Image (cartoon, grey):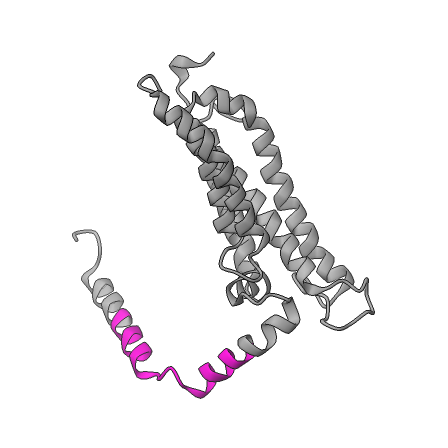
């Protein structure tokens, strides 16, 4: 803990605490939450054709997130085959 | 794998095709049952890893050459991007789906786009995780 200023640590803890409190205080049946849930449940099958809501969300409503994950995996593969590979694209 | 036993050899070779089919099932039916491209791809990769554990890893690399796996992964990702851009070309925008009842543009059902994206993600993740595992399993001292 030498290098980190103490004030930064305290601030981080405060932000985390505030986050947890906020999550606990906002009821799950809140208007906005309910509207979002109703939107996903009602629209997903009609607009994507998927009964499985998880598939509908990760390939339609959050497709950019999926693309980012694919990029992350590709970077991981590139790194591993660069550092540990010996055949295609390896550095050994 | 010097300490390979007959048991591991036989079991892995009999089990791997079924694991692979299960992975394909997870990818293909992700729109109506639990599953998806990531999960199915990892299951497919686990079948290849099972083969590599039971058999010699260089036998498996002859079946799935690393160079081909690299190519498949990148190409699947490019196709994924192409489908995403196709949404911008034909429908509302990038990563958009064809309208449900609409026959105006191509008349595709939205599920076709979803299943295509799922299959591409499955192929990409499957080849990617296989590549990770095979690259890390390699043993330079025993390279043929």
Is residue B134 shown above or below B38?
Answer: above
User: Can you say whether B3 is above or below B133 in the image?
Assistant: above
Q: Which residues are the magenta region?
A: A16-39
Q: Is residue A61 left or right of residue B7?
A: right
Give me the residue at 62% from left, 33% from top. B71
Q: Position of residue B116 (x, y in %)?
A: 65, 53
> Which of B137 and A53 lies nearest the eye of the viewer?
A53
Note whether A77 is above or below A54 in the view shown. Answer: above
User: Where residue B77 sits: x, y (%)?
Assistant: 61, 45
Q: Quadrant of residue B54?
A: top left
For image coordinates 26% across by 66% down, the residue present is A12
| Residue at the far left in the pictured view | A2
Measured from the top left, where is residue B11 in percent x and y? Answer: 40, 30
Magenta segment includes A57: no
Can residue A63 be seen at all in this image of the molecule?
A: yes
Q: Is residue A80 visible?
A: no
Q: Is residue A1 left or right of residue A52?
A: left
Image quarter (top left, top right, bottom left or bottom right) of the N terminus of chain B:
top left
Which is nearer the eye, B16 or A10? B16
Query: Residue at 54% across / 76% down in the picture?
Result: A41
Query: Residue B102 lies in what quarter of the image?
Result: bottom right
Q: What residue is rendered at 58% in x and 39% in y?
A: B73
Q: Is residue A31 above or below residue A88?
A: below
Q: Position of residue B67 (x, y in %)?
A: 58, 27
Q: Nearer the viewer, residue A85 or B126?
A: B126
Q: Main secondary structure of the magenta part?
A: helix
């Amino acid at each position: 803990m030498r290098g980190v200023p103490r004030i930064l640590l305290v601030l981080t803890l405060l932000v985390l605490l505030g986050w947890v409190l906020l999550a606990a205080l906002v009821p799950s049946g809140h208007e906005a939450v309910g509207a979002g849930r109703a939107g996903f449940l009602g629209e997903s099958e009609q607009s994507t054709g998927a009964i499985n809501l998880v598939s509908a969300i990760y390939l339609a409503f959050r497709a950019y997130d999926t693309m980012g994950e694919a990029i992350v995996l590709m970077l991981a593969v590139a790194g591993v085959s660069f550092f540990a590979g010996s055949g295609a694209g390896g550095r050994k | 794998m010097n300490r390979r036993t007959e048991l591991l050899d036989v079991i892995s070779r009999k089990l791997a095709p079924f694991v692979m089919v299960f992975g394909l099932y997870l990818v293909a039916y992700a729109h109506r049952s639990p599953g998806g491209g990531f999960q199915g791809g990892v299951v497919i990769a686990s079948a290849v890893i099972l083969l590599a554990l039971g058999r010699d890893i260089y036998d498996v690399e002859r079946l799935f050459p690393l160079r081909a796996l690299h190519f498949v992964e990148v190409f699947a990702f490019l196709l994924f991007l192409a489908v995403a851009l196709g949404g911008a070309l034909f429908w509302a925008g990038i990563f958009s789906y064809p309208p449900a009842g609409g026959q105006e543009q191509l008349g595709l059902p939205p599920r076709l786009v979803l299943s295509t994206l799922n299959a591409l993600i499955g192929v990409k993740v499957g080849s990617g995780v296989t590549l990770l595992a095979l690259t890390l399993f390699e043993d330079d001292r025993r390279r043929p």
